[in-house]
Image (spheres, helix red, strand yellow):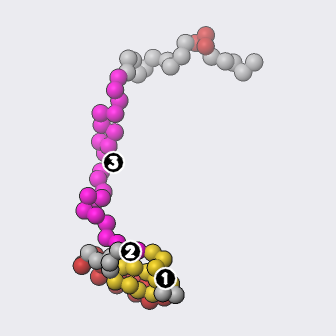
């Protein structure tokens, strides 16, 4: 993966500025510790934008007979005996 490389201490000190810079140029930032890569900060893809939860389950109920009828018959109840 190509991108800018930043030490963990520098990332900690400049985190917000680096995030703004990455959001502007879209280039990922490789975070290193003692010269070894430990994490990658990358921009969120456009397709991962949040969508509204309203209507998210639309069309998921396939069928139902009577939503107001009991789930089981009264004689099937276990009275804890």
Report the span colored magenta.
Answer: 40-63
Q: Nearer the viewer, residue 28 or 72?
A: 28
Q: Residue at x 45, y 87 (%)?
A: 7
Splitting the image into 4 quarters, where does residue 24 fall?
bottom left
- Say which of marks 3 and 1 sits in front: 1
The residue indicated by pointer 3 is: 53
The residue indicated by pointer 2 is: 41
Q: What secondary structure is marked by label 3?
A: loop
Q: What secondary structure is marked by label 1?
A: strand
Query: Dot 3 surroundings within 10 Å: few (below 14), some, or many (20 or more)?
Result: few
Residue occupying the far top of the picture = 75
Q: Quote the CA–CA distance across marks 3 and 2.
A: 27 Å
Which disc, if any, is residue 36?
1
Q: Is residue 51 magenta?
A: yes
Residue 27 percent across, percent down from the top left: 28, 77
Q: How many marks?
A: 3
Splitting the image into 4 quarters, where does residue 78 fall?
top right
Instruction: Tell which circle, 3 or 2, labels the residue nearer the N-terminal end.
Output: 2
- Say which of marks 1 and 2 sits in front: 1
Q: Are marks 3 and 1 in contact (CB under 8 Å)?
A: no
Q: What secondary structure is marked by label 2?
A: strand
Q: Quote the CA–CA distance across marks 3 and 1.
A: 40 Å
Q: Is residue 15 above or below residue 44?
A: below
Q: Quadrant of the C terminus?
A: top right
Query: Dot 1 surroundings within 10 Å: few (below 14), some, or many (20 or more)?
Result: few
Residue occupying the far right of the picture = 81
Q: Residue at x 29, y 53 (%)?
A: 51
Instruction: Tell which circle, 3 or 1, labels the residue nearer the N-terminal end.
Output: 1
């Amino acid at each position: 993966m190509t991108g800018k490389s930043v030490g963990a201490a520098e990332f900690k000190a400049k985190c917000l500025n680096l995030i703004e810079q990455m959001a502007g140029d879209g280039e990922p930032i490789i975070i290193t510790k003692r010269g070894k890569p430990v994490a990658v900060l990358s921009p969120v893809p456009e397709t991962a934008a949040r969508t509204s939860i309203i209507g998210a389950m639309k069309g998921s109920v396939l069928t139902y007979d009577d939503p107001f009828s009991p789930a089981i018959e009264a004689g099937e109840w276990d009275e804890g005996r």
